[in-house]
Image: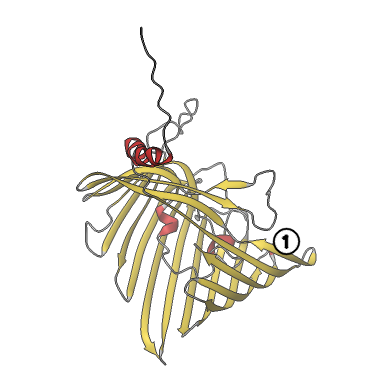
């Protein structure tokens, strides 16, 4: 006579088994992170007048991590999405994709592929004091891109204070003779970063139908009136690489210049930035001036107020912004 035995696991047995099961699947070594950035602002347009808005400024939620493969080799991954704090659902989408990739990291550097902010944009470092706000660089110049289908290498600390980054974008259009190669677009940067000095060179080759060169310089002084002072300078040269398109005024070359400065004292920081551009795809003869005051709340959160004035030849591109907001990273 055969007997059947049934085992009903106790709660303690489940707890003992659970870590083994998790380890079999792989370590949970990721980090949840994000940033909420919301402002209440008045926008005045030369074309449509004045309006008050609650604005979500590139708020985001992400998951990233690094899994060790060997002593000097690790797998990298990141999934990041923009979230619309104000609307809740932006143009039919609750979230929008930001930098999302998988890659490998070793003593030789990092190699990753996915949707990535290109090195040309990243080369600006901390120059753009109004990034994610209405005073940011991308409002009047081209080149501030996050692209899909990017394969990117960066040297990390292989060269000491120097870092080299190179990204290629395959064509992925088999029916187009000039859009089917392994690297139809290329973006790269060379960055020197030390405690007080920051210098970078960025370039784009046939990215969004443009060839571009960007130069950035920055310097930090400590103990300036018991505070710190950061200053930066910016130059960009752009040329249309596709004969079928042109800048908004019909020309094929453009220059842009800019300066920025931030003075921090205790919990407060005063910021100023000025950018001028000959032309871009959407604007001609444009300038942008911004002022801001940041006040730290605790260790991470910031309460801020800012003013931005943007002028251009096109009437619809002449705007003024006055805002107060709060930024909380987590």
Element class at badge 1: helix
- Residue 12 horizontal/vertical position (percent): 39, 41
- The residue lying furthest to the top in this view is 1
Nearer the observer, 81 or 23: 23
- Residue 130 horizontal/vertical position (percent): 54, 69
Q: Which residue is mark 1?
A: 316
Residue at image location 36% in from the left, 48% down from the top: 29
Nearer the observer, 228 or 9: 9
Q: Is 197 left or right of 78, judged from the image as shown?
A: left
- Residue 133 horizontal/vertical position (percent): 59, 65
- The residue lying furthest to the bottom in this view is 225
Nearer the observer, 286 or 306: 306
> Is 31 placed above or below 11 here?
below
Residue 140 appears anywhere in the view: no
Image quadrant assignment for residue 293: bottom right
- Residue 86 horizontal/vertical position (percent): 68, 58
Residue 40 appears anywhere in the view: yes
Image quadrant assignment for residue 111: top left
Nearer the observer, 135 or 184: 135
Q: Is 79 left or right of 279, judged from the image as shown?
A: left
Residue at image location 57% in from the left, 61% down from the top: 36
Residue at image location 37% in from the left, 77% down from the top: 219
Q: Is 238 left or right of 12, judged from the image as shown?
A: right
Residue at image location 36% in from the left, 36% down from the top: 21
Q: Label 1: few (<14), some or many (≥20) within 10 Å?
A: few
> Is 330 placed above or below 259 here?
above
């Amino acid at each position: 006579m055969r007997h059947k035995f049934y085992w009903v696991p106790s709660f303690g047995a489940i707890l003992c088994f659970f870590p083994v099961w998790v380890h079999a699947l792989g370590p949970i070594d990721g980090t949840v992170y994000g940033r909420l950035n919301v402002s209440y602002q008045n926008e005045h347009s030369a074309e449509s007048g004045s309006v008050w808005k609650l604005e979500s400024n590139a708020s985001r939620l992400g998951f990233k991590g690094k899994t060790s493969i060997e002593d000097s080799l690790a797998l990298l991954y990141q999934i990041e999405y923009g979230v619309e704090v104000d609307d809740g659902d932006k143009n039919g989408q609750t979230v929008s994709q930001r930098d999302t990739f998988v890659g490998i990291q070793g003593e030789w550097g990092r190699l990753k592929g996915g949707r990535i902010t290109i090195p040309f944009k990243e080369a600006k470092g901390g120059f753009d004091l109004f990034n994610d706000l209405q005073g940011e660089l991308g409002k009047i110049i081209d080149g501030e891109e996050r692209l899909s289908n990017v394969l990117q290498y960066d040297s990390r600390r292989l060269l000491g204070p120097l870092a080299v980054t190179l990204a290629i974008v395959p064509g992925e259009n088999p029916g187009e003779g000039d859009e089917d190669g392994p690297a139809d677009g290329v973006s790269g940067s060379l960055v020197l970063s030390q405690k007080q000095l920051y210098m970078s060179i960025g370039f784009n080759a046939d990215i969004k139908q443009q060839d571009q060169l960007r130069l950035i310089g920055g310097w930090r002084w400590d103990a300036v009136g018991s505070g710190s002072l950061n200053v930066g300078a910016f130059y960009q040269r752009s040329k249309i690489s596709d004969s079928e398109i042109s800048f908004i005024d019909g020309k094929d070359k453009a220059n842009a210049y800019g300066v920025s400065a931030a003075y921090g004292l205790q919990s407060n920081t005063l910021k100023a930035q000025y950018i001028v551009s000959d032309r871009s795809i959407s604007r001609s003869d444009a300038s942008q001036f911004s002022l801001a005051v940041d006040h730290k709340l605790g260790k991470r959160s910031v309460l801020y107020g800012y003013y931005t004035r943007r002028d251009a030849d096109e009437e619809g591109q002449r705007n003024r912004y006055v805002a107060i907001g709060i930024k909380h990273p987590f």
